[in-house]
Amino acid sequence: MKEDIAEIIQEYALSHFKRFSELSTMQTTISAKEKKIKLHDLSAVISMGSSKINIIIVFSADKTFVDKLTQLETNGIELDKDEYYEMLHATLAETANIILGHTTRDVGLNKSPISLSPPMLIESSNSMTCAKKASLKSIIFISQYGNIEIHIVKPTGNHNPILEECIS
């Protein structure tokens, strides 16, 4: 079993996206980035916490990518403009929930319960800056429909040797 939370998230995200042949050729990398997260058109922020883990995960995607994912997920269901706009947001939020829900199974850390916050959606923001001492890892997925990035932030003051192993 992988111990690096970024690798676990990457594995579940790839599995989720590759259900669709249109997204089966996605390229992906993991990197330790600078303290600034460049946000794309639409982002979902979720915190993951327990007695042994406390991190923030940011899913940030190009609108073209979320648009394609929404089309694939709705599979031809006809939606008016307002419904489609709402579904676009719901698609990113639910995608994040599904991927992180699977991740919690593998990051169970001695069967300790892990909670996920509801996704907070952010639109039309340029960036987020992490605290100086925060750890940041980013997973970048590149597709012909645009990109999605998943950023894992360990907040300052959260000294946890188990978590530091997972995202260092």
Image (cartoon, rainbow, N blue to C red):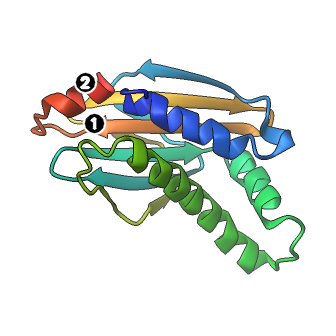
Residue 46 horizontal/vertical position (percent): 39, 55
- The image quarter containing residue 1 is top left
Q: Residue at x 21, y 40 (%)?
A: 155
Residue 26 horizontal/vertical position (percent): 73, 30
**Residue 51 visible in the picture:** yes
Q: Residues within 10 Å of mark 1 (few under 14, many from 20)?
A: some
**How many numbered marks does the figure carry?**
2
Q: In the structure shown, which secondary structural element does the residue marked by tag 2 occupy?
A: helix
Residue 119 horizontal/vertical position (percent): 44, 62
Q: Nearer the viewer, residue 97 or 125?
A: 97
| Amino acid identity at mark 2 | Glu
Q: Residue at x 33, y 29 (%)?
A: 136
Above or below, comparing residue 66 to residue 87 in the picture: above
Q: Which residue is mark 2?
A: 165
Left or right: 120 as drawn, with respect to 140? left
Q: Depth-wise, is mark 2 or mark 1 nearer the camera?
A: 2
| Amino acid identity at mark 1 | Cys
- The image quarter containing residue 15 is top right
Q: Earlier in the sequence, mark 2 or mark 1?
A: 1
Above or below, comparing residue 63 to residue 73 in the picture: above
Image quarter of the C terminus? top left
Residue 130, numbered circle: 1
